[in-house]
Image (cartoon, rainbow, N blue to C red):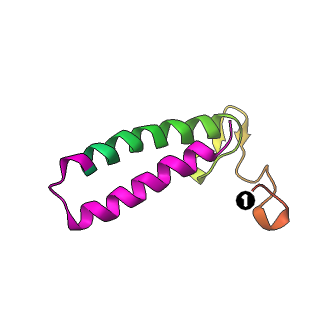
C-alpha cells in the first residue's frame, strides 16, 4: 500500500473544506467532502496496517509501539 491514496483523498477533503467555509449550503461540495473523507480514512487505516502509521494514534498495534520504527523524512525516510 502506498500513500498516494492518502494524499489524494486528503487533498480533496482539504480543498472541499475550504470551499465549504464560504459555500456551506453547496450539496455537491458536502457530498464530495463526505465521500472523500470516508476514502481518506480507509486509505489511512490500510497504510497504518501495513506498518506505516501517519499519526501517533495509529501507531499502537498488536506488534507494539511502531511510531519510531521507520526512518524520519530527514533521515532518508519516504517523504
The quarter in which the N terminus is drawn is top right
Above or below, 25 relative to 6: below
Give the class, few, some or many, for how many residues have Cα within 10 Å of label 1's Cα (few <14, many ≥20): few
Q: Nearer the viewer, residue 13 or 76?
A: 13
Q: Does dot 1 land on a helix, a strand or a loop?
A: loop
* Horizontal and vertical percent position of residue 59: 64, 46
Q: In the rendered structure, which segment of residues is drawn in magenta?
A: 1-28
Q: Determine the residue positioned at 71% across, 39% down.
A: 51
Q: Main secondary structure of the magenta part?
A: helix
56 sits to left or right of 79: left
Which residue is nearer to you in this view: 54 or 30? 30
Tell me the residue that label 1 is attached to.
79
The correct choice, above or below, for 13 with respect to 41 in the image is: below
Residue 16 forms part of the magenta stretch: yes
Quarter containing the C terminus: bottom right
Residue 23 location in percent, x, y?
20, 62
Which residue appears at 14% of the width and 55% of the height? Answer: 25
Q: Residue furthest top?
A: 62
The answer, for residue 57, to whether it is visible in the render is no
Q: Residue placed at 75% from the left, 54% from the top?
A: 68
Q: Residue furthest front?
A: 28
Give the left or right position of residue 3, taking residue 43 as reference: right
Rendered image quadrant of residue 20: bottom left
Q: Quadrant of residue 43?
A: top right
**Residue 71 shows in this picture:** yes
Residue 6 percent location from the top left of the image: 56, 46
Task: Find residue 22 and report its horizontal and vertical position in percent.
Answer: 22, 68
**Left or right of 72, for residue 19:** left
Q: Is residue 13 magenta?
A: yes
Amino acid at each position: 500500500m502506498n500513500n498516494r491514496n492518502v494524499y489524494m483523498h486528503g487533498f480533496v477533503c482539504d480543498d472541499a473544506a475550504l470551499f465549504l467555509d464560504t459555500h456551506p449550503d453547496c450539496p455537491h461540495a458536502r457530498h464530495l467532502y463526505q465521500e472523500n473523507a470516508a476514502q481518506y480514512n480507509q486509505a489511512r487505516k490500510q497504510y497504518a496496517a501495513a506498518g506505516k502509521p501517519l499519526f501517533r494514534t495509529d501507531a499502537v498495534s498488536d506488534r507494539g509501539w511502531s511510531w519510531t520504527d521507520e526512518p524520519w523524512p530527514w533521515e532518508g525516510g519516504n517523504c
